[in-house]
Image: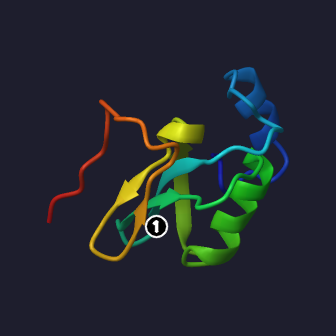
Amino acid sequence: MKLADNEGWAAQTIEEEMPAFDENRLRSAAAYDNRGNVWLIVTPTPCTIEQFRSAILQKIVPGQLVDGILLDGDGSSQLLSRERKLQGDGREVYQMLQIVR
């Protein structure tokens, strides 16, 4: 996501062939802060990559994120935690990240 590079992040993302860069899609990402905490982020509503990145910078420990990675998006953007469940398009997802304490 090149969170510290507000000028070059979009060009790199396009160069890396991010699917549906400027389309409204469900999105997911993983980011880490300067204390070593990892944040898994999933949108409940569709947005563009630019909107998603901007929201992450504004809402997830502002000023403390170091960097992150954009994950697969759209219907496979799902989340299951004690606090929240986001079903994406409801399909079975065969690849996932699990965070264990």
Secondary structure under the numbered disc 1 in the rendered image:
strand
Quadrant (top left/top right/bottom left/bottom right) for the C terminus: bottom left
Residue pictured at 67% horizontal, 23% vertical: 16
Q: What is the count of numbered marks?
A: 1
Residue 90, percent from left and from top: 44, 43
Residue pictured at 30% horizontal, 45% vertical: 97
Residue 97 shown left or right of residue 44 in the figure: left
Residue 29, above or below 55: above
Q: Which residue is mark 1?
A: 33
**Res 67 quadrant in image:** bottom right
Residue pictured at 41% horizontal, 36% vertical: 91
Of 61 and 49, which appears nearest the observer?
49
Of 40 and 42, which appears nearest the observer?
42
Whether residue 12 is visible, yes or no, is yes
Residue 10, above or below 32: above
Residue 55, percent from left and from top: 70, 66
Residue 83, above or below 36: below
